[in-house]
Amino acid sequence: MTIDPRPILIAFGDLVKFDPRLKADYVYSSLMAAEKWLVSQRRNCLVPGAPIMFYQNRLGFVGTAAIAQVAQTSSADSTACPGLPLKLFPYRISLEKIRVFPRPIDCRPLIADLTFIKNKKSWGLAFMGTPRLIPKGDFGRIVKAKG
């Protein structure tokens, strides 16, 4: 019996304090083109087949992918996004089934219906500490809002 992995939320923002090139949109487009994402922690939820929802701070939900593999980063990963400090992101998620949304999905109209957002007034707190699991229903609501 195969268990369907639960969806994961990954939120990200600018990393310009490390390198002025590392604006969130540059990091996202570079890593999506390289079919990978780098994370600071190896969490149990990062399993092959798990769907990922990407949220760009102050912009919205920007795309989805699925995990193909999780491994430690290597020097070869530095070419995916020049300037990204690999020592802060020791794990690489190889991605498949990548879908970059044509335009970001604003989170605010969805807040009332997203169950992973417990505090509806301070909803930004729900995007801290990612990657983290989110309910399948919430993942589906976000994808459906894409139109």
Image: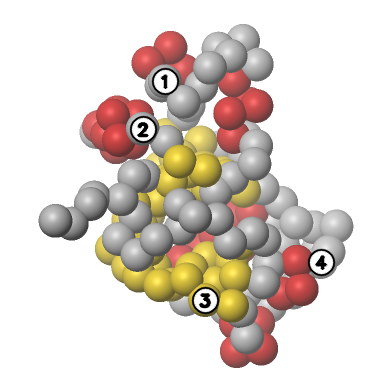
Horizontal and vertical percent position of residue 55: 51, 42
Question: What's the residue type where badge 1 is placed?
Answer: Thr
Question: What's the residue type where badge 2 is placed?
Answer: Pro
* SS under mark 2: loop
Residue to which mark 1 is pinned: 115
Q: Earlier in the sequence, mark 2 or mark 1?
A: 1
Q: Is residue 111 above or below residue 43?
A: above
- x 71%, y 51%: residue: 14
| Quadrant in the rendering for residue 76 | bottom right
Question: What's the residue type where badge 3 is placed?
Answer: Ala
Real-space Cα separation, disc 2 to disc 1, in angstroms:
7 Å
| Mark carried by residue 135 | 2
Which one is in front in this view, the residue at disc 2 or the one at disc 4? 2
The C terminus lies in quadrant? top left
Horizontal and vertical percent position of residue 33: 45, 72
User: Mark 3 and mark 4 in contact (Cβ < 8 Å)?
Assistant: no
Residue to which mark 4 is pinned: 19
